[in-house]
Amino acid sequence: MIREFSASDILFIASAARWTLILSAIAFLGGAIGGLGIALARTSGGTLLRRVAAGFIQIFQGTPLLMQLFLVYFGLAVVGLPINPLLAAAVALTFHASAYLGEIWRGAIEAVPSGQTEASMALSLSYTDRMRHVVLPQAMRLAVAPTVGFLVQLIKGTSLASIIGFTELTRAGQIINNATFKPFLVFGTVAALYFILCWPLSLLARRLEARMRRAVTR
Amino acid sequence: MYQFNFQPVFENLDLLLYGALLTVRLSLAAMVLGLAVSVMGAVGKTSGIRPLRWLIDVYVEVIRNTPFLVQIFFIFFGLPAIGISMSPNTAALVALVINVGAYGTEIIRAGIESIPRGQIEAGRALGLTPVQIFRYVVVKPALRNIYPSLTSQFIYLMLTSSVVSVISANDLASAGADLNARTFASFEIYLVLTVMYFLLALGFSTLFATIRRVFFTYPASR
């Protein structure tokens, strides 16, 4: 039975957007913790630690997110866990976000002038104090703009969770399309909703970047 | 305990290798055509025609702020509703070209703007011909500036192209999906696919780094 595309369908799609947001939030929080670890390992003194972190970044930036999703999804069965699309998507996107945020934040940490680190060492601050009170606060200011930019990439990335069967914005669109067969309207609506989520973030990232550039050149 | 079974993968390795070849071909075709779109977009954006600039802005922003998956669904399933039907392979190529064209437009515009006016004037003052100025003062330094962004964009495009498997266009991910439907050795198949994509990405970034060393060591030699 093919029915009409109605206001309730738009409502269904729009309310599925909350799962896109929830998934993005989980991946971003997980990725922030993982990314901080990666960034600190990447800039640490230990050669092995630095190499492991670099390898992690290279693997996750050098393979498709879709393959990462499939691997985690089917990998759950390998380690004996029940197959669960939300869990698989959350884990895969967390790894993905950890690698990208780790790389962004590594750059920010390295951009803090080395004199700052040397000064903290001369003041005999411990590693934790040096990072917490001297290096990271300055790195954070540099990292804000690219981090917001990555958030856009992450929200778009959550659409791939639909392929392993998690019902977020894109999958809700597919479901409605199968019932109404109005692909032009349905996917147009889905695209518009993603645009509404992502565009403000893109504008914010650009504004922050411009402000940062002015601050640096001044 | 899970029993790994790589046999179906290795028995069908030729299919996967052919899939990898298709992925490389699709990505190269999309990059070349996408660059053509990007150059037109960048020239249009730096032109004085306001409606054209506005149109290009809309194109770039819409593509950059929506997922590729939705773009390909819209092109493959949505466009036939207004009379534009394409085969999966054509739709995949078109979607990738449109996608990379938007990112490329921004990269190339930045490249054009990275050449200060004064350098062109300096070239003229040195008595270079317009062709020489274009070649040595504009194109080469601009290319050198945008080369890293363009090459990483290509690798990103190649990884993104795995998404075209959702409309059953022919590529590496599709070859894997076909094999999975026949043998159900899912984890093993996707593990090998992931490794293959990684090797492709690694191979191309090594190639690009070599090209960069040969052609863009500057200003040592011309």
Image: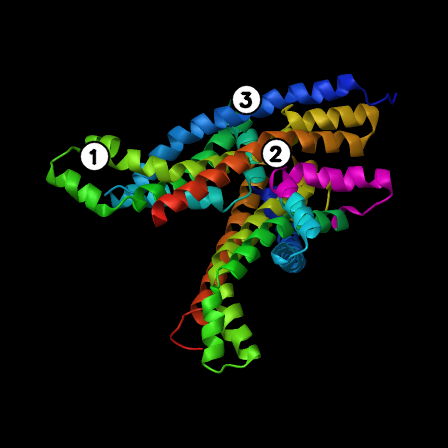
Q: Which residue is drawn at 66% across and 18% down?
A: A15
Is residue B83 rendered magenta in the image?
yes
Q: Residue at x 75, y 42 (%)?
A: B75
Type of the residue with mark 2 = Leu
Q: Read off the residue under disc 2.
A: A160
Q: Residue at x 52, y 69 (%)?
A: B138
Q: What element carries label 1?
A: helix
Q: Quadrant of the N terminus of chain A?
A: top right
Q: Which of marks 3 and 1 is nearer the N terminus?
A: 3
Q: Classify residue A137 as left or right of residue A86.
A: left
Type of the residue with mark 3 = Ile
Are the residues under marks 1 and 2 on the same chain? yes
**Highlighted range, magenta:** B61-89
C-alpha separation, residue under disc 3 versus residue under disc 2 = 14 Å
Q: Classify residue A74 as left or right of residue B211.
A: right
Q: Where is residue B40? Give x, y as percent.
A: 66, 59
Contact check, label 3 and label 2, Cβ < 8 Å: no
User: How crowded is the residue under tag 3: few (<14 C-alpha within 10 Å), some, or many (20+)?
Assistant: some
Please say if B54 is above or below A125: below
Q: Which of A86 and B4 is in front in this view?
A: A86
Q: Read off the residue under disc 3.
A: A22
Type of the residue with mark 1 = Arg
Q: Which chain carries label 1?
A: A
Q: Residue at x 41, y 77 (%)?
A: B221
Q: Where is residue A187? Give x, y as percent.
A: 74, 32
Choose top left, top right, bottom left or bottom right for residue B9: top right
Q: Which of marks 3 and 2 is nearer the N terminus?
A: 3
- Picture disc at residue A130: 1
Q: Where is residue B192? Give x, y as percent.
A: 55, 44
Contact check, label 1 and label 2, Cβ < 8 Å: no
C-alpha separation, residue under disc 3 versus residue under disc 1 = 34 Å
